[in-house]
Image (cartoon, helix red, strand yellow):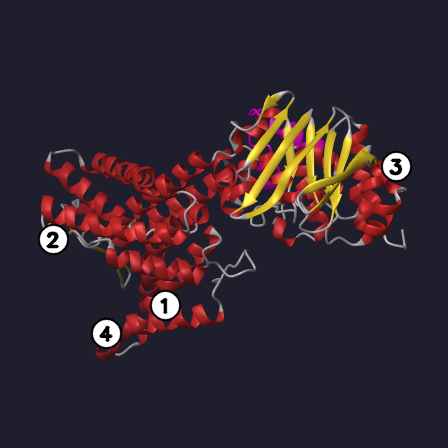
């Protein structure tokens, strides 16, 4: 589905991603884990076209994305829920979903809204409310719901559990597991290493702009190095 | 009672024109993060378009319609020619560019048209007064209120009910995320400028209908009022421009009413003082959608 080859991204003189290669196969849930500043979100921004890349290639279903403008990528069946949720705060919940379905044909929007609302009943209750007035957990649900408006084949989630209460974190990971069951290919970037390894098929570990380890999620979860660096003694 | 009704009409009359202008500023600010100082000159462009058309014998209302559209297209052209090449630069560069456009337009008007004020023929029915009981109301004022309220309602319907309107607001709220959703940057930015031009055109119609003349720097005074209204109301949300416009209208009408005749000259000073108060104590304006201060 997604193939990233030798990706390099720099912010001015600072190299944030220094030649990263990885892939996500159809139907898989792949997670990229790593500490703050490892280059995980930058990698996702490069995939969405939000940062200029300094080298390498990104291909979706065998076709390079480098020439596709940001606005054109939604039409390719990929969708994105950004770090920090970034819902459209001044818009109502319903309008956020409509904006998420911007590329849908005119007749389809309503049916998609109904389908998405059925999955997130809390949003249905609040559909007229401004998104800025929702709780953090509700905003995260809205960010995911908004990304689902286009019925994506490939969903990219950036830190969906960041800053949420433990109970809500559990709900977010339940939704991720459900989406995977429903056949959506998912690339998940997370700091909650324990939960994301539990839900993923495969994982990559990023450190200072490089992938330092990769493998089946289960194997990495029991890897002593990973255990010490990211899971701590409590996990 | 009569006095109170006249006061209220003055509030709505001033407030609605300021609101239209401030909305034009905020719609563009939402997309590109700068205040377009050439916005007032779109009003002047409307004025000259109306002037020339009436001189050529185009019927007044047709000329008005064409002039409003002309202002819209001038705004789009401004973006295409001057602002698009600077896309991605800091909003400060765009702001300074807009000063340059404004200055250039003033000179072009002075050299190619006339440095003097030119009378615009206003139809008979917009001049004079009507009386309801003891109350004298200017016909141009009634016309202003009807047109402005209709324009504001149409704008609201467009922004909340149409796909383009929602795309415009989404992109004002988070430009990059909106692009990820497939909302095309060039298209929403052009749309924002077109709307701002149309709003400036409508405001100019109302402004000129009450003054009857057009001159090269016509847009300057209303632009400054609109800037004050937009800043007081808040730049992050069209609602802010609406509230700010009516707040400023109410403020000016009130000052005109309560200040003794000798002190009316201090009206603008009081308005600016209140602006300073807002900048110090509520820099995000009445309606602050974004918790962090605007750049």
Q: Residues within 10 Å of mark 1 (few under 14, many from 20)?
A: some
State the residue in front, B249 or A2: A2
What is the chain letter for disc 1?
B
What is the chain letter for disc 3?
A
| Location of mark 4 (residue) | B265
Q: Give coordinates of residue A144: x percent, y percent.
A: 69, 39
Q: Are marks 2 and 1 on the same chain?
A: yes
Q: CA distance from mark 3 to mark 4?
A: 78 Å
| Location of mark 2 (residue) | B117
Q: What secondary structure predominates along the stretch shown in magenta? A: helix
**Element class at badge 2:** loop
Question: Quick one: label 2 or label 1, which is nearer the N terminus?
Answer: 2
* Quarter the N terminus of chain A occupies: top right
State the residue in front, B51 or A42: A42
Q: Which residues are magenta?
A: A95-115
Q: Can the viewer see residue B20 in this picture?
A: no
Q: Give coordinates of residue B66: x percent, y percent.
A: 25, 35
Q: CA distance from mark 3 to mark 2?
A: 80 Å
Q: Is residue A49 above or below residue B220?
A: above
Query: Looking at the image, which residue is at 51% across and 43% down?
Result: B175
Q: CA distance from mark 2 to mark 1?
A: 29 Å
Q: Residues within 10 Å of mark 3 (few under 14, many from 20)?
A: some
Query: Looking at the image, which residue is at 74% across and 28% down?
Result: A184
Q: Is residue B146 above or below residue B133?
A: above
Instruction: Confirm whether the magenta stretch covers residue A62.
Output: no
Residue B205's mark? none
Q: Nearer the viewer, mark 2 or mark 1?
A: 2
| Location of mark 1 (residue) | B251
């Amino acid at each position: 589905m997604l193939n990233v080859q030798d990706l390099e991204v720099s912010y001015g003189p600072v190299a944030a991603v220094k030649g990263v290669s990885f892939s996500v196969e159809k139907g898989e849930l792949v997670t990229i884990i790593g500490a703050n500043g490892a280059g995980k979100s930058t990698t996702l921004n490069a995939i969405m076209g939000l940062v200029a890349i300094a080298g390498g290639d990104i291909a979706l279903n065998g076709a390079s994305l480098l020439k596709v403008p940001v606005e054109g990528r939604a039409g390719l069946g990929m969708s994105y829920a950004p770090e920090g949720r970034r819902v459209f705060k001044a818009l109502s919940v319903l309008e956020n979903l409509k904006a998420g379905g911007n590329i849908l044909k005119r007749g389809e929007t309503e049916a998609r809204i109904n389908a998405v609302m059925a999955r997130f009943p809390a949003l249905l209750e609040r559909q007229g409310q401004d998104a800025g007035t929702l709780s953090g957990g509700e905003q995260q649900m809205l960010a995911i719901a908004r990304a689902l408006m286009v019925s994506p084949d490939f969903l990219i989630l950036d830190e969906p559990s960041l800053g949420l209460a433990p109970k809500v974190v559990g709900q977010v990971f339940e939704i991720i597991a459900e989406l995977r069951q429903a056949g959506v290919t998912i690339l998940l970037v997370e700091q909650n290493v324990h939960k994301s390894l539990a839900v993923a098929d495969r994982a990559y570990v990023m450190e200072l702009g490089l992938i330092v380890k990769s493998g089946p999620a289960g194997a990495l979860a029991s890897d002593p190095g990973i255990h010490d660096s990211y899971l701590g003694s409590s996990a | 009672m009569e006095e109170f009704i006249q006061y209220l009409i003055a509030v709505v009359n001033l407030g609605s024109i300021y609101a239209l202008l401030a909305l034009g500023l905020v719609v563009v600010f939402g997309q590109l993060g700068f205040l377009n100082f050439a916005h007032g000159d779109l009003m002047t462009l409307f004025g000259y378009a109306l002037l020339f058309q009436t001189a050529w014998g185009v019927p007044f209302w047709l000329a008005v319609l064409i002039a409003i559209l002309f202002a819209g297209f001038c705004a789009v052209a401004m973006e295409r020619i001057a602002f698009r090449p600077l896309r991605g630069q800091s909003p400060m560069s765009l702001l300074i560019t807009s000063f340059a456009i404004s200055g250039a337009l003033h000179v072009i008007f002075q050299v190619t048209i006339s440095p003097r004020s030119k009378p615009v023929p206003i139809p008979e029915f917009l001049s004079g007064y009507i009386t309801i009981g003891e109350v004298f109301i200017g016909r141009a004022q009634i016309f202003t209120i009807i047109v402005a309220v209709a324009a504001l309602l149409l704008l609201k319907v467009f922004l909340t009910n149409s796909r383009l309107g929602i795309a415009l607001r989404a992109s004002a709220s988070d430009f990059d995320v909106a692009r990820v959703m497939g909302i095309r940057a060039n298209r929403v930015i052009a749309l924002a400028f077109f709307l701002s031009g149309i709003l400036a055109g409508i405001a100019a119609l109302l402004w000129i209908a009450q003054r009857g003349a057009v001159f090269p720097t016509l847009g300057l005074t209303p632009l400054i009022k609109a800037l004050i209204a937009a800043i007081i109301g808040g730049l992050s949300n069209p609602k802010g421009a609406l509230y700010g416009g009516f707040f400023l209208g109410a403020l000016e009408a009130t000052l005109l009413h309560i200040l003794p005749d000798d002190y009316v000259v201090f009206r603008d000073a009081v308005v600016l003082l209140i602006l300073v108060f807002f900048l110090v104590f509520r820099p995000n304006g009445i309606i602050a959608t974004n918790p962090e201060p605007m750049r």
